[in-house]
Amino acid sequence: LITAAEYDQFEWEFPSAEPIPYSLAGGAISSIWFDRVGGLDPRFAEDTKSVLKSVNRLKAMIDEKKAEGVEHVVIGGFSMGGGIALQTAARCSANITAAFSLSSYLCSDSQAIALDSWPPLFMGHGRADDFIKAEWGQATAEVLKTKTSVEFKLYDHTFHEMNQQEWQDILTFLRLHLTPDSTCRI
């Protein structure tokens, strides 16, 4: 979806979620960032304990990069990965330059929403996403606009997936928030 030259503008790392029991899969062990109980709808309560476990793991990775001298860290993700990126951005904003969240949202009762220190955000969502509904992502973006700069984009004819335009918009967002000569990890 992007060229090698575009990809090589930044250093990328792709951590994986750890396997934990997933309530929505009948308790089956799944590689997920946090548990969901009751359903996907944002009206279901956030499982804050599992959220914080993953946030702390990602925070340790960010702290390690900062200790190595990495100047700018951007966190982002897709679907549940986008949700944990938002959760981490809210709790580690002093060490995060910017964040992006794709096809994702926060639960209505998320503790992250109450936090006031957020980095700039890019949020993208497929308009035709029938798994994580676009209105859930849009509602999260509207709430977060009271906390920080949020760029929210909907992509026509796009389901629960990414497309080339979304990638280009992410790269534009990253270039806006990062200097070309800075050391950066995403």
Image: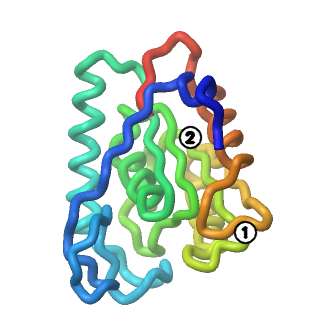
Closer to the chain start, of discs 2 and 1, is 2
Q: Residue at x 35, y 20 (%)?
A: 70
Q: Quadrant of the C terminus?
A: top left
**What residue did someone put label 2 on?**
120
Q: Is residue 149 visible?
A: yes
x and y percentages locating residue 140 in the rendered image: 57, 64
Q: For residue 180, which quarter of the picture?
A: top right
x and y percentages locating residue 129 in the rendered image: 65, 73
Q: Residue at x 72, y 55 (%)?
A: 153
x and y percentages locating residue 105 in the rendered image: 52, 66
Image coloring type:
rainbow
Relative horizontal placement of residue 72, taking residue 51 as reference (left or right) = right
Q: Nearer the viewer, residue 155 or 162?
A: 162
**What residue did someone put label 1 on?**
127
Q: Residue furthest right?
A: 156
* Gap in angstroms between the C-alphas marked 2 and 1: 22 Å
